[in-house]
Amino acid sequence: MKNILDPVRQSVKEIRTLWNARRTEGAKPKLFGLIYFNLLFVFMYSVLLAFGVFYIGIGIFVHPNGFLGLVAPIPGLLVAYFIRMKVYPKAREKAVKQPGWE
């Protein structure tokens, strides 16, 4: 369970860090783009995770064909995880290149 929710925890931590950093003098407007990306990621990941849990519940308690509903949420979670862990750090480095920030 820790591995599944780890990207969400990282995004929430990143949102808090960026939100506090935007108050500093000379903060770039690109920080808002990073904040919005993290908020969108948390929302999308949570919705896909909720659908996955819902379809698992249907598959267990109602009918085994309910597991077929996992065809969409599971690849969606994997794509979101890939974007958050592989693509986002590169974009973040480009956006945050300013002296005195991390």
Image (cartoon, rainbow, N blue to C red):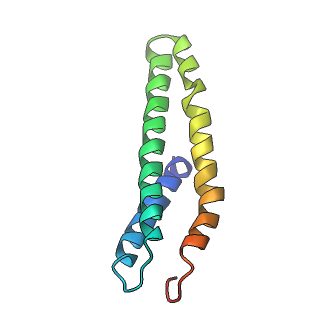
Rendered residue at 44%/12% (across/down)? 62
Closest to the observer, 10 or 38: 38
In this view of the protein, can residue 90 be seen by the observer? yes
Rendered residue at 48%/23% (across/down)? 55
Residue 88, position as x, y percentages in the image: 59, 60
Up the image or down, 98 lies above or below 7; here it is below
Residue 26, position as x, y percentages in the image: 41, 84
Q: Residue furthest front?
A: 29
In this view of the protein, can residue 13 be seen by the observer? no
Which image quadrant is residue 43 in?
A: top left
How many discs appear?
A: 0
Rendered residue at 62%/43% (across/down)? 79
Residue 41, position as x, y percentages in the image: 48, 50
Which image quadrant is residue 36 in?
A: bottom left
Rendered residue at 48%/36% (across/down)? 48
Closest to the observer, 68 or 17: 17
Up the image or down, 30 lies above or below 5; here it is below
Up the image or down, 41 lies above or below 90; here it is above
Residue 102, position as x, y percentages in the image: 52, 82
Give the side of residue 89 with respect to residue 33, left or right. right
